[in-house]
Image: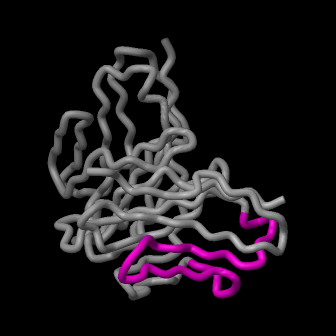
Amino acid sequence: LAKTTQPISMDSYEGQEVNITCSHNNIATNDYITWYQQFPSQGPRFIIQGYKTKVTNEVASLFIPADRKSSTLSLPRVSLSDTAVYYCLVGDTGRRALTFGSGTRLQVQP
Amino acid sequence: NAGVMQNPRHLVRRRGQEARLRCSPMKGHSHVYWYRQLPEEGLKFMVYLQKENIIDESGMPKERFSAEFPKEGPSILRIQQVVRGDSAAYFCASSPSRPSTDTQYFGPGTRLTVL
């Protein structure tokens, strides 16, 4: 199972773009990259998922280089409500047990 | 479409009592997962169930813990003879029967406190 490494914490200000990079050197061919967001006292919420290149939805963008050994979650123009823990997960679509690391704690200040 | 429902949201038990946590998956979802989260840590997988079957229980302690997902009704995570170390947030997630990717939808969690 591919292990992920991401920064423990990040600080930003409202209106800025935030990029959180996750390293997954041992990613396997069948693995997808998924990001979840978790607010205090709530369950994780799915943000975005990708396999390669770039994926964009109404919330975020996910950049995956050709070697897929890392990925970057990009949050455009963050607001205070984006303060949360962000988890990068890597796994085979056939494997059901999600493995969460410690995540990146993003603090957005006014 | 209602999301994943969990109850109770908060549960207090004394050492030695039993704790029962319930999870109702999203409509149309037949896969249920249970995770445990300790303070300041990521979620840890416990068990994966489909209707009436346990598919993967590799993350669940062998003793005192059990899970079921009956044909009718919610999934139940049962902890017998609770100890203080069982205090944690327990999250349930569900996914569709034939997902194209491994996306799980999480409930709000049950916070168990063992006195």
Q: Nearer the viewer, residue B8 or B96?
A: B8
A12 is higher (above) or lower (below) than B105: above
Q: Image height check: is A89 above or below B86? A: above
| Front-most of residues B42 and A69 | B42
Query: For residue B62: magenta?
Result: yes
Quadrant holding the N terminus of chain A:
bottom left
Q: Is residue B95 left or right of residue A108?
A: left
Does A14 appear above or below B71?
Answer: above
Q: Identify the residue at horizontal 48%, vertical 29% (top origin).
A: A83
The residue lying at 39 percent from left, 20 percent from top is A79
* B91 lies left or right of B89: left
Which stretch did the figure color magenta?
A: B60-86
Percent position (x, y) of residue A102? Answer: 55, 52
Please tell me which residue is depicted at 31% across the width and 42% down the height of the picture: A72
Number of disc labels: 0
Quarter location, residue B51: bottom left
Say if the magenta span includes residue A63: no
Percent across and percent down for residue A45 are 38, 47
Front-lying residue, A93 or B62: B62
Q: At 40% from the left edge and 52% from the top edge, which residue is drawn? A: A88
Which quadrant of the view contains residue B56? bottom left
Is residue B62 or residue A67 the one in the foreground?
B62
**Can you give x and y, in whole percent of width and height, for residue A40 in the image?**
56, 39
Q: Is B40 left, or right, of B68 in this rendering? A: right
Judged left or right of residue B37, residue A106 is left
